[in-house]
Structure formats: structure tokens, C-alpha cells
Image (cartoon, rainbow, N blue to C red):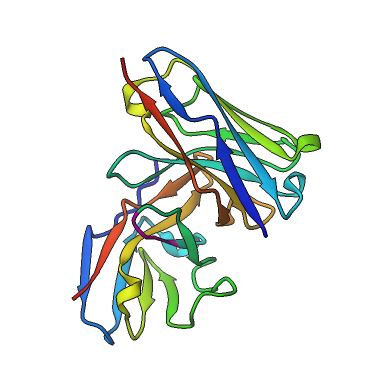
Amino acid sequence: EVQLVESGGGLVKPGGSLRLSCAASGFTLSSYNINWVRQAPGKGLEWGSSISSSSSYIYYADSVKGRFTISRDNARNSLYLQMNSLRAEDTAVYYCARGAGATPVDGFDIWGQGTMVTVSS
Amino acid sequence: SYVLTQPPSVSVAPGQTARIPCGGNNIGSKSVHWYQQKPGQAPVLVVYDDSDRPSGIPERFSGSNSGNTATLTISRVEAGDEADYYCQVWDSSGHHVVFGGGTKLTVL
């Protein structure tokens, strides 16, 4: 079965750090662009970051730029989101999502189940 | 930055047609994707590239895009279609993915 599985969420204090992981099964992660999308409780979807299959391009939303770093380890079929200087407004379910095609124009055809990040003192 | 505007809610009776608009400046020049999200679940792609359907998505789901409005159309609406729907585009000028605010579809 083609799927993505996120892990690494949890409770962290403001100013703290957390690293999320996204593991792929049923397909080769290295062949796809991958994205992080978050959803605050009761709110809509918010894009956070995208990385191309070869890491040749990386993009960030203004809300996370300079604090979050996306990376991938194609040998391990995994993707990561290092989150630093966390704020209360970063509290959300974080999804990784596969790009359906080779460009950032393409939609996201496979989504993980999400991992919850709570930033609170 | 590019903004996508969706109505917060749309209501429709079973068996009728639901139309969910997504407004954006010259959105007709972009590829629009639509996602369905049911409570407690991850989003699911239901229409991509304006009007194409992924495998497994019923033909009742269709899309169009022209001018300043893209539209997701759900024909013969069923109770199981009740969900939040989001439109999404790539903003090439800002190198950002943009989501609309989402529309809650209620089946009366």
C-alpha cells in the first residue's frame, strides 16, 4: 500500500525545538517532491514547506521561514522537518504530502495521517 | 501574496448539485487542485489540474476554471459528501503553495 507516515510530534515549550519525520512505504520517496502542510485546531490547511525530489529546490512559507528546515534522506526513504523557535501559533496537526508530479504546480496525491504538535508552557 | 477566497459554507439537498467556488486574481491561468477533508481525517485529492480526477474518485466530482473563479461541482450529492473542501494553487511569483480558506459542505 502506498502511504506516508509522520512521527515526532508532541508537547514542547515555546522557544523549543522538535523534529518531525515522514516515512514512505509502497513507493520510492526519492522520486517525488514532498510537502509539509499543517492545520491548527479548527482551522484550514496551511502550507509550510516543499522540497523537490533531488533537493534542488526548497521553499518555505513566510510564517516558518528562518525557523523550520526541511530535508530528506533518500537512502532511508525519509523526510524531515526540523522546527526551532517554536511558538504557540505553530500548534497544529502536521501532514506530509506527496507531490503528484515533477513540479511544484502539481497537487498532492498522497497524505500521511498527520502528527500533532502542541506548543505550550 | 496570492489569495484564494472560498465561501465558508455551502448547503445542498441530497441528489442536487453543489458548486463550490474558489476566487483568485486571474486564477484561470493557474492549475487548481481540490481536496476533500472529513472530520478527523487527512485531506484527499478529488480534482487536480482544474478538472481531472484521480483514480477512485467518482465521476460526480468535476472541476472548471476560468477568469477569476475556479469551481468544484459535485453532482447527485450524497450524505457521504459532507466535508470541508479546499482549493489550492501554486503561486509562481512568490514560490508558495496557496490554499483557500475552505468550504464546509452541508448535506441537508
Q: Could you say where residue B5 lies in the image, as x and y percent from the top left?
A: 30, 55
Residue drawn at (68%, 41%), measured in percent from left and top? A52
Q: Is residue A76 left or right of residue B36?
A: right
Who is closer to the viewer here, B95 or B54? B54
Name the image quarter holding residue B36.
bottom left
Q: Could you tell whether A62 is left or right of A25 in the image?
A: left
- For image coordinates 72% across by 35% down, the residue present is A55
Q: Could you say which quadrant of the image residue A71 lies in?
A: top right
In magenta segment, residue A98: no
Q: Residue at x 49, y 20 (%)?
A: A67
Magenta residue check for B36: yes
Number of marks in the rendered image:
0
Which residue occupies the foreground of this view, B103 or A115? A115
- Majority secondary structure of magenta residues: strand
- Quarter of the figure that contains the N terminus of chain A: bottom right
Q: Which residues are magenta?
A: B35-39
Tell me if residue A83 can be seen: no
Side of B9 relative to A120 (left or right): left
Residue A101, given in percent of the width and then of the height, sits at: 66, 57
In the depicted view, which residue is nearer to us: A1 or A79? A1
The x, y position of residue A39, in whole percent, is 38, 42
Residue A61 visible, this angle: yes
**Residue A23, position as x, y percentages in the image:** 66, 41
Query: In this rendering, is residue A33 above or below B11?
Result: above
